Amino acid sequence: MKPLVTEPTPRQRPGLQGWIRRLLILLACLWLAVGVLLPLAEVFEKATTLELQVAIDEPTEEQKTVDPFRGEIRTAGYSMVLLEEGGQAVLYLNNRRTDPVDASDEHLQVRISDTRFEQVVISSAIPPGQTKRMPIKPVTIERHSGGYWLIDGHPFPLGDSVRTVVRFIGFTNFMYYFGIQDLTQKQFVGALFLIIAAGFLLIRMLVDFLRKKPATVRTWYLPAAVALLLGAQVIGSGQLLYSHSGHTNLAQSTWNSLLVAFTTTLIAVVLAFIYAYGLTRTKMAGKMLFRVVAMLPLFAPTMLYGLSLVYLFGNQGLVTTGFFGKVSWLAWDINLYGFTGIVLAEIAFTFPPAMMILSVALAHTDARLYEASSSLGAGRIRTFFMVTLPGVKYGLLSAVFVCFTLSFTDFGAPKIVGGHFNVLAVDIYKQVVGQQNFGLGATVSLILLAPTLLAFVTDRIVQRRSHAALTARSVPLTPVSLPWRDRLYTLLCGLIAAAILAILFTAGIGSFVKIWPYGFSHPEIYPELWTLSHYRFEGVGGGGFKAFFTSLRMAGYTALFGTIITFISAYLIEKTRDAQKLRQSAYLLSIVPLALPGLVIGIAYVFFFNKPTFSLPFIDLQIANPFTFIYGTMAILVLSNIVHFYTVSFLTATTALRQLDKEFEIVSESMGVPFYRTFFRVTVPVCFPAIVEIAAYYFVSAMATVSAVIFLYNSHLPLASVAVVNMDDAGDTAAAAAMCMLIVVVNILVRLGAEGVCWLFAGKTRQWRQK
Amino acid sequence: MNKKIPKKSVTSTDFFLEVRNLTKRFGTFTALDNVNIGVLPGEFVSILGPSGCGKTTLLRVIAGLEQQNNGSIWIQGKDVSCEPVANRHLGIVFQSYALFPNITIINNVQYGLRQMTAPARRERAREMLELVGLTDQTDKYPAQLSGGQQQRVALARALAPNPSLLLLDEPLSALDARVRTRLRGEIRSIQEKLGVTTIMVTHDQEEALTMADRIVVMDQGQLMQFADPQQLYGAPANTFVAGFIGTMNFLPDCRHQSTTAVRFLDYSLDTRPPEALYSHDKTSTLAIRPEHVRIADDQDRSSNILRVRVEQIEFRGSVSRVMVRVLHLAGHPSAHQIEIDLQPKAVDQLKLDAHRDLDIYLPPKHLLAFPDSSAVTGGQSHAA
């Protein structure tokens, strides 16, 4: 009709409120970048680079008059000392007198003039912990006429004695780890890439085939040919790698860890399924009690399971010695130390989360499916496989991934009962804390990260699909009474619960026994059986009560700051209308920590917060690291804990916020009420139970965790969980058990406190909650 | 070329709210397609349409909750297209009430009154609660009230800051039928009392027809017609509006014979097709309301008579709806059905029952004609 001028509409201004919100979301992104991404990048860098220490020493003019010493350069496994003997320069290379001309070869070039080092070029180095010299980009050390040295062109004043030079070495560490020799890096990476790519394509094909997705090519032989080629590729590349790899103790731990994780997952998921099934689908007795018992292991550090197993099955264990020789026909040595012990402890550790996931999955089912199944004449077993299992498949998968990840990355239990059975998590600890070999430590932690990351990504892809499978109006299933089945499940769950209680509290009992086991077996020599002396932590390492109270403080700060940050971030991401891209990136960043094992966080923090300067990529510029000041303080402990347990808390907060009417924000915005007012006045009070839940989770987790903080604590800040490890290392098992019990008791008290607060809150707010 | 026209000169109208050339796309989906609306001060306008027609999107763009791709929103002669929600001085009421559950009724109502002193706030909130008849519930919490009461609180809260424009998004859809009917009248009378310009989105045509001064009918992102209820019912602009508002019988594929007559099947029907649309090679669709169809008596034996067969009779209380099938002149049934509203008494008198053949009369003055081929033109009508 009327040709109106259609000028593009200018964008709506977000207004001050909008800008504040954006700024806050940006801050959330930034702190996650500093707390997660940058440290992680540092691990990658450390794993693929070699750090060479260059030390130069030269005598002063005065010293020259009394001493033949004319200079020393130490780097990359070379020691070069220059002496003056009769007006002639004499070079000692690695303590062997060498002619400077002879000394120069493909690895090293030395130029000397006027009885002084003129230039040294080093083209190979030995990575720490390894024995083979490997080529590197040459390091040039030369004298500058201005009276100072140049290392790679950077001035190095005489007073400075050591300079670190970083060289990229790619996958050398990984190849060393798996004992791969006589392969170039290109061959190694190429073979690895082919295995991964071809394997991925094969799996895709298989999945599509199993789901009967129509193939784009409708002939059978083309997919078959592709599958054949891909399969050949995987086998060929694998064989290439295998034929060049040798057995290394390091690589052995990868297989050990995988073996532990698979075994644990299999057993723990089956047990958790039985237990969850009993809780949700039968009318067995004492459900409430069973539920509580299953949750108990969550309050304990994983070392506790190890310690209890030692008390039960260790060399002097209750069962091993047949109740101290009293019932010797019951004596049973299960060979605890090593695989058996680790798996038993990990089962206890992974059981509660698996049980929770499965009981939620089993509870959320549609009774109509079961009615349909039985009306169609399907039997129990058929119904189980056709209805029950498919209904919980996503929960089952989640439980499998959680069990796998937790047991694959756990540090505490293998540290106590691992014996000579090496696993990755303990290897990292040994490399970093024991041998100070950071490069290899970083490499091992990346190997630890890989399966975890894979499980995480797969789980997220699968779970996204599960939303579509949910139906809106399903009828909840109420279990019917069935005496024989109910009794069977009471028995099974009772056995599992008894095992949990045993694994939790044997160490507790042990902590009160003066001298285990002789107090039992030789009462005539040790008349005093029970004692509280282990709780005094006298004469043992680890920090005793100071450690315990530092842990309390750390857990308190973690709960306080973690809850605030988590809830506000979740609120901003969930309840902001615009700034979609920013919110999506913040959400993604918030999910990442779930994939990171505590050890990786710890080692990443050691690298990142220790690093004095960053070199910016592409331009030769160094900037000071502004975050180093928190290293060695309470702040870094708290930060590592918040990051470690961030995602679970974040998802709890998000779920709570999603239950709130999304129009609250719009209504207050339209009335001109600033968002923070509605946040404090409405959002926080309504979400209060979830907030308490998050705080309790942070506290309990921070108290019990050892993996991240074991790299970050120091003697001023001893921690209870680290003290457990150290006391056990020193053989003070009873004191270690005592410390574990303190942690468990505090955690249970905190949990009860949280329940109490929520109960009071519910009472006070009954009026506005009634429906 | 396209110099910016000074914004004041464009709004030489009396419109309180004006929506100009509004287009909103979500990806490839066009939710609003060049929509123009002008709302007078104090008017109650309802946006009506089937689900997915873009009516809620229109409301959200007016409120500033969505950013339009093109076009502008003017309130009281000011371009507010770039203003955030807070600067548009709106009161919004949602289907979900969105009352703050942890705050008492009185505090909910005074939530937006921050500039006033505490006693003044309380006074205003009381006033508002009196207006919606809930003075005795002030210290209760929302969950303790019924749905209808909660929606009245939401209304009071939206009105308390004295908004220039009240937006209601399906305000009655969550309520049961009896409460809904009562609240319709209440909302309307409160709106009239305060004289606040109001826009209400609804999918319930009865709600729109009974409450609104004028109704915006939308379909697939386009404005179909913007007119008062009588006009919408009596003179729908196109077949969509005709079919959407009330019940309508359509006689499709009518060929034009002359300026006053069309051919439907074998019958010739007198009508007044819009002159501009008259053409020999085009077809029209005729439409007539069930209540306008008559059983033919002897005086009518001239034209506009159709031979039909009764198929079904539905008793609906005040009227009976008779479903008939149009027969060809030769006596065999066609594919077309017509619904007729008759007094139950008349049905008895005529002894109508299924399978009876009879003649019906379609009065020319009630026969509406819509051209077939021309696409439905988006209503550019600002006309009040």
Image (spheres, coloured by chain):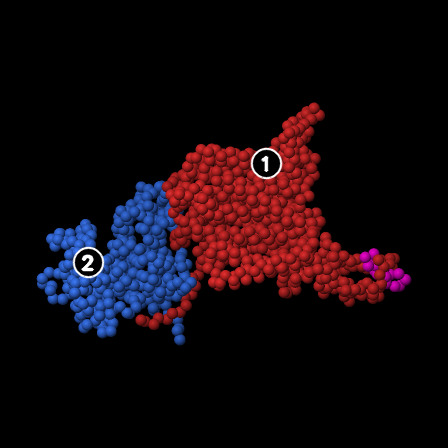
One can see residue B119 in this view: no
Type of secondary structure dominating the magenta stretch: strand
Q: Quadrant of residue A133?
A: bottom right
Q: Give x and y (percent) for residue B8.
A: 35, 67
Amino acid type at image mark 1: Ile
Instruction: Give the quadrant of residue B252.
Output: bottom left
What segment carries the magenta color? Answer: A81-95
Q: Colour of chain B?
A: blue
* Chain A image colour: red
Is A266 situated left or right of A103 in this image?
Answer: left
For label 1, the residue is: A503
- For the N terminus of chain B, give its image quadrant: bottom left
Q: Depth-wise, is mark 1 or mark 2 nearer the camera?
A: 2
Q: Which mark is residue B326?
A: none
Chain letter for the residue marked with disc 1 in the picture: A
Viewer-nearest residue: B274 or B294:
B294
Residue type (three-letter) at the residue carrying disc 2: Val
Give the structural element (helix, strand or loop) at label 1: helix
Residue A766 visible in the current orientation: yes
Q: Which numbered marker is on residue B324?
A: 2
Residue with the most extreme left position: B298
Is residue A83 a member of the stretch shown in magenta? yes
| Apparent side of residue A726 relative to residue A474 in the rendered image (left or right) | right
Query: A731 above or below A438?
Result: above
Chain ID, mark 2: B
Residue found at x 49% / y 36%: A489
- Which SS class for mark 2? strand
In the figure, is residue B51 to the left or right of A711? left
| Residue nearer the viewer, B382 or B176 | B176
The location of residue A338, given as percent across then percent down, is 65, 42
